[in-house]
Amino acid sequence: MRLRHPDGSTVHLSYCTNVHPAEDLPGIHRQLSGIAVRVRELLGAERLGLGLWLPQQAATDLLARRDELAALRRQLTALGLEVVTLNGFPYRGFHDEIVKYRVYTPDWADAERLRYTLGLAEILAALLPDDVTEGTISTLPLAWRTGWTRDKATAVMANLDKVAQGLRALAGRTGKVIRLGFEPEPGCIIETTPQAIALLNDVDHDYLGLCLDACHMAVGFEEPGAGAGTGLPIVKLQASCALEAPPGAQQALAAFDEPRFLHQTRSATGFADDLGEALAGGMSAEASWRVHFHVPLHADPPPPLTTSAPYLRGLVHTLLGGAAPLTRHVEVETYTWNVLPDAPPDIAAGIAAELDWMRGRLTSLGMKEQ
């Protein structure tokens, strides 16, 4: 969906398709014609934005067969869908039985991460609607923290230079500017926005910047305005909510301790890399816990648990409530619908409700649907 900011610029609202398990092009086509269209219809929207996730094999196939890429673009248009942003964080196997730490590989020290990301940029440049000249891709925050060495840091910075050069060359060739946003996440080399600002200070800010994930920021107990006015561009906001438990009620989180995804857990006084570790005694129960478990934006979990929705509202106001938006791409990213303790039978209805909630936040800031 597109909304007009009071300053006249367009803000793009989308939902991220990494919630859907598909590793190949036929599966992606089924997603689009099935769930995505139903979400659009439930919202009563003429046009629905997607934050498309293209696993490595699907991206490779699209680049090898340009007729398939053209067919995907035609399908998006025919179905009332559009893509201005891609999620380039998961490489493949995001819906395997166990993902956990594997989601951080290959990292930015690996040439394969560079190749994959530049391939995504080529695809996005071809998928952008005719009246859109700028796209964004979100990516992992360099690497998971363990195994980090000076040699690895050198390799990462070399690859960041190469990806910026590749994006600049793509813009010169196609007229489409694709920007890459590094997504701070607890436990990674870039955990927080201030760390990102320090580590990415010398990269090419014309093409490289930040993707702010509201769930990650809340789990890290960051101030909502940490990334504002720093000179490092915020290329995308991922609208997401973390799970919260008040002091003494943390055992209620046990229902969310599932085996597929990593659920980093933080409090004001401690941390654990996964929820099961925290529940087993790895953290004190005397402070509130926040858990990296993306929960629906519009709905509260069973009490006494709550979510970081107030934090998300504050972040949206900081980034989009001023005289000019600090980012123009907003992506609802709740990829955990299928692993919720009471997973709903109709995920499309849940996604539509989240998007409607987010649309309400944006219109409350004076934006109007286009």
Image (tube, rainbow, N blue to C red):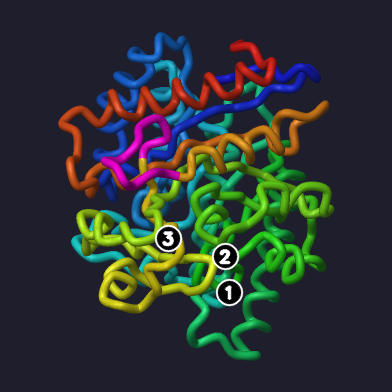
| Up-down relation of residue 235 to residue 354 (above or below) | below
Secondary structure mostly taken by the magenta-highlighted segment of the chain: loop
Residue 313, given in percent of the width and then of the height, sits at 58, 35
Asked if one can make out residue 211 in the rendered structure from this viewpoint, the answer is yes
Q: Quadrant of residue 162?
A: bottom right
Q: Which residue is mark 2?
A: 141
Q: Please state the total of marks drawn on the protein image.
A: 3
Q: CA distance from mark 3 to mark 1?
A: 22 Å
- Residue at 59% x, 12% y is 369
Q: Quadrant of residue 6?
A: top right
Mark closest to the chain's N terminus, 3 or 1: 1
Query: From which residue to which does the magenta span run?
Result: 296-307
Q: Quadrant of residue 221?
A: bottom right
Mark 3: few, some, or many residues within 10 Å (few <14, many ≥20)? many
- Residue at 82% x, 26% y is 323
- Pick the front one: 193 or 348: 193
Query: In the image, what residue type sits under mark 1?
Result: Ile
Horizontal side of 146 relative to 75 (left or right) equals: right
Badges 1 and 2: C-beta atoms under 8 Å apart?
yes
- Pick the front one: 28 or 341: 341
- Pick the front one: 308 or 121: 308
Q: Which residue is mark 1?
A: 189
Q: Which residue is mark 3?
A: 289
Dividing the image into 4 quarters, which one contains the C terminus?
top right
- Residue at 42% x, 60% y is 289
In front: mark 3 or mark 1? Answer: 3
Query: In the image, what residue type sits under mark 3?
Result: Trp
Magenta run includes residue 6: no
